[in-house]
Image (cartoon, helix red, strand yellow):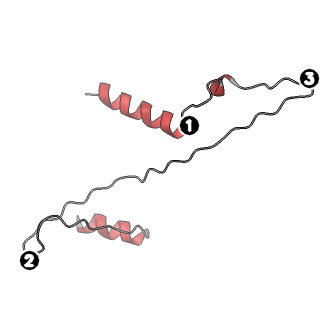
Amino acid sequence: MADVKRKLEEKGIKIETDEIGVRNEKYKDRLIIDLPMNVKPIIKRFYADEDGRVRIPDAYKNEVTYGENIKALQWCYMDREYSP
């Protein structure tokens, strides 16, 4: 674990410590590596063309849809579910 911690710190990645239980001199560490997930709502505004038609691509035909990153994560999870 020390090697992984050192590599993370060398890359400028701050390691957070979440202490569980009453603090004393006996403890065991477990390093959890995760990715931050932030919500990023984006409004795609489609304007009418010279013919007066608003042409919206099929990917955006619903008023609310998931972005490419969420779709990619969904495929990763589905693939993992079916992997041995």
Callout 1 touching callout 3 (CB < 8 Å): no
Q: Position of residue 45 (x, y in %)?
A: 74, 37
Alpha carbons under labels 2 and 3: distance apart: 74 Å
**Mark closer to the chain start, 1 or 2:** 2
Secondary structure at badge 2 equals loop
Q: Identify the residue under disc 1.
A: 67
Q: Identify the residue under disc 3.
A: 51
Q: Position of residue 3 (x, y in %)?
A: 27, 67
Secondary structure at badge 1 equals loop
Q: Quadrant of residue 52?
A: top right
Residue at the image position 84 percent from the left and 23 percent from the top:
53
Q: Mark 2 is on which residue type?
A: Glu
Q: Nearer the viewer, mark 1 or mark 3?
A: 3
Is 58 on the left-hand or right-hand side of 64?
right
Is 49 on the left-hand or right-hand side of 7?
right
Q: Quadrant of residue 65?
A: top right
